[in-house]
Image (tube, rainbow, N blue to C red):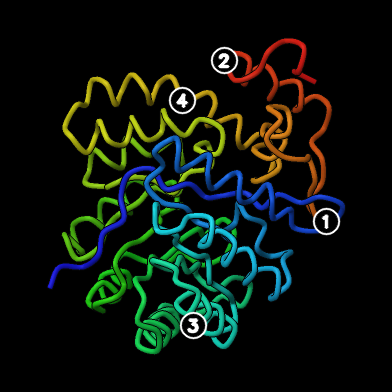
Amino acid sequence: MAKKSFQGSIVALVTPFRDGRVDEGKLTELVEFHVKNGTDAIVPCGTTGESPTLSHEEHKRVVEVVIEAAARRIPVIAGTGSNSFAEALELTKHAKKAGADGALMVVPYYNKPTQKGLIQHFKGIAEAVDIPIILYNIPGRTGVNMLPETVAQLAEIPNIVGIKEATGNLEQMTQDAILCGDKLTLLSGDDTLTLPLMAIGGKGVISVVANVAPRDVVEMTHAALNGDWKRAQELHLRLFPLSQAMFYETNPIPVKTAMAMMGMIQEEFRLPLCSMTEANRKRLAEALKGYGLLKEERCC
């Protein structure tokens, strides 16, 4: 039986806060925004969703609110990763029970497991919870790089269906594609590399910039999937400066600041994340204006 496939533009959704709490009303609005703009799937409680600063109760509630708001109109892939096997297992079981369509599971961070440990970690959860799982490799945050040979072993597990690659290394991603073939859906974890990755067999992106420009990310990924590389390239080049702007400072600081400038959410973070420097705020406003997302009077 073919594995479930998630592809196209999958938004890594921000978690809006208001007065220190999760703003459930705004969260619901954001889901509706993505449904209307054709986004292919939503990831709540990923890195962009500030999952490290959410309590377990908040994390579970965010997943539930997004699933309720999506109402089966758009797939929900819940972030459920942790550096604790027991915690990741608990969050993945909750996602399944809440009705999520899949789970995004980051490589365990800080404790720096071996490749053998990674296999045992993901295999154990995949065997315990019957839900489609997308692996998430981001060594810049976790301190561990999941090697293509490890990915290939995990691809043999029926409900491990994809990998979000955020290594920034196209050679490694190419090795993933060679070793895994159609056993694993390859997704970009970096907006600036989505099109290059799709050119070597990737199927889309788990995107930060889609929070502010969803239609263009959808159109770019769909053009590539349909073989219209000319249109995909046009959109990639247009999106590129905006995608870079989303990383002027640590994600999700710039994207949440941008969304606040656009009137979508409150500009609120949880420490240790904080507001942007004034210089970077001005650079971000210029990028938004250049893309047509911000009028002069709302720039700062």
Does residue 263 appear to the left or right of 239 in the view shown?
A: right
- Separation of residues labelled 2 and 4 (CA atoms): 12 Å
State whether residue 193 is above or below residue 62.
Answer: above
- Separation of residues labelled 1 and 3 (CA atoms): 28 Å
- Separation of residues labelled 4 and 3 (CA atoms): 36 Å
Amino acid under label 1? Leu
Near-viewer residue (111 or 97): 97
Near-viewer residue (70 or 127): 70
Residue 239: assigned label: 4
Q: In the displayed image of the protein, which residue is found farthest to the left? A: 1
Does residue 95 appear to the left or right of 269 in the view shown?
A: left
Element at label 4 = helix
Residue 93: assigned label: 3
Amino acid under label 2? Gly
The residue at the point 47 percent across, 34 percent down is 214
What residue sits right under mark 1 in the picture?
A: 271
Near-viewer residue (88 or 83): 88
Q: Closer to the camera: disc 4 or disc 3?
A: 3
Near-viewer residue (83 or 112): 83
Image spot of residue 114 (x, y percent) = 47, 79
Residue 292: assigned label: 2
- Separation of residues labelled 1 and 2 (CA atoms): 31 Å
Tell me which corner region of the image, top left, top right, bottom left or bottom right, holds residue 60. bottom right
